[in-house]
Image (spheres, rainbow, N blue to C red):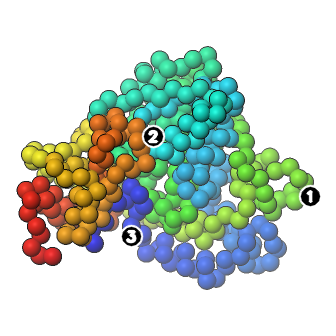
Amino acid sequence: MIYFDNAATSFPKPDIVYEKHDEAMREFAANPGRSGHKLSLKMDRAIFNSRMNVAEFIGGKNPMNMIFAFNCTDALNIAIKGLIKKGDHVITTSLEHNSVLRPLHKMQEEGFIDLTIVYADEKGIIDPKKLEEAITDKTRVCVTTAMSNLIGTIVDFCKIGEIMHAHDILYIVDAAQAMGYLDFDMSKMPIDVICFPGHKSLFGPMGTGGLYINDGIDVQSLKEGGTGSHSQELDQPSEYPDRLEAGTINGPGIYALSAGVDYIKKVGLENIRNHENKLKDRFISGLKDEKGIILYGSLDENQGPVVSVNVEGIGSSQLAHLLDEQYGIATRAGLHCAPLAHKTIGTEKIGAVRFSFGHFNTEQEVDIAIEALKKISLGEKNESI
């Protein structure tokens, strides 16, 4: 199997991630912060160390503002519903995942907010000036992705953040695809809340994710429950992280996620990014001039390691099936939980097949994918299968 579905979740993981997850599960998987015995205290310390490690990785000054969640969708719901108030006007874009679009749409349908969706151009480029033009006197929050999960477009989120902060507007960034690929420094970037998964380019297990909240930003709790702190009070604790981490969190997963971050530090984020860019560029170069094969996105340095493809005369689901069954290549077909992004590039009715390259992919695997698409486009079968 050649795995090109890293935008959904990275696979495989570094060995150290498997080892640390297994270690936690076997040796100290007690409930953190609830008990005073040695195993509970060891898990509590492991989570705190992980909190510090992940916060430091993204330039967060206060590890207590590093909130762990179960995935990026969970983190985005916490941020969006914890910041937005009734009557607010909110700005977002057409590149967003349903993790952003669905909660905002529901709030709009219920009359809770007014919503403006700014469309990208056909290559997925967002003009920050258009977001500024959408600002009204009631605009309080802006939410955008850092990188499209459909076509890999890298959004100029720093420029957008500067514009929003100039108008005293809160800015939430969805870094689902960008975390572990781009550099982030929350101490310097004009971002109020950043949300990310643990299981994608940070190499953590599924069931991990988080949000970092800059100092002075008041995110209300989405859910209430046990925290192991202030248990005599019926009110949810007011301080982070307890305010936003009701219930038992995924301790072994968080411990393993921290190991994934350590692995990135060891290899070097720039080295990982350069490798993934090389794979993306090789893929685009090998297919951009092929008749019958359509590539989407800017197809340049503004595109991360995510490229969506269609082959004329073949449905996207059929194409993904052929790649899987005949060539052992794993991709993702359909609408990728990003319907407006597909509408932006004109594929809302046919979908596309997404190739997303990761750290453990090789140039040889990319070459195999290129040849497979060429053969499928020409109606040839893979005789070696």
In the rendered view of the protein, which quadrant contains the C terminus? bottom left
Mark 3, residue position: 12
Q: Please name the residue shown 26% across and 53% down the image.
A: 316
**Which residue type does callout 1 highlight?**
Gln
Q: Please name the residue shown 86% across and 49% down the image.
A: 235
Q: Is residue 293 left or right of residue 20?
A: left
Mark 2, residue position: 96
Which of the two marks, 2 or 3, is nearer to us in this view?
Answer: 2
Where residue 248 sits in the image (x, y, percent)?
71, 65
Mark 1, residue position: 232
Q: In this view, does 37 lie to the left or right of 290?
A: right
Where residue 97 sits in the image (x, y, percent)?
46, 44
Where residue 311 sits in the image (x, y, percent)?
18, 50
Where residue 200 sits in the image (x, y, percent)?
44, 59
Secondary structure category for the residue under label 1: loop
Q: Residue extending furthest bottom?
A: 26
Q: Please name the residue shown 33% across and 57% down the image.
A: 332
Which of the two marks, 2 or 1, is nearer to us in this view?
Answer: 2
Relative depth, front residue between 178 and 145:
145
* Residue 278 visible from this viewpoint: no
Q: Which of marks 1 and 3 is nearer the N terminus?
A: 3
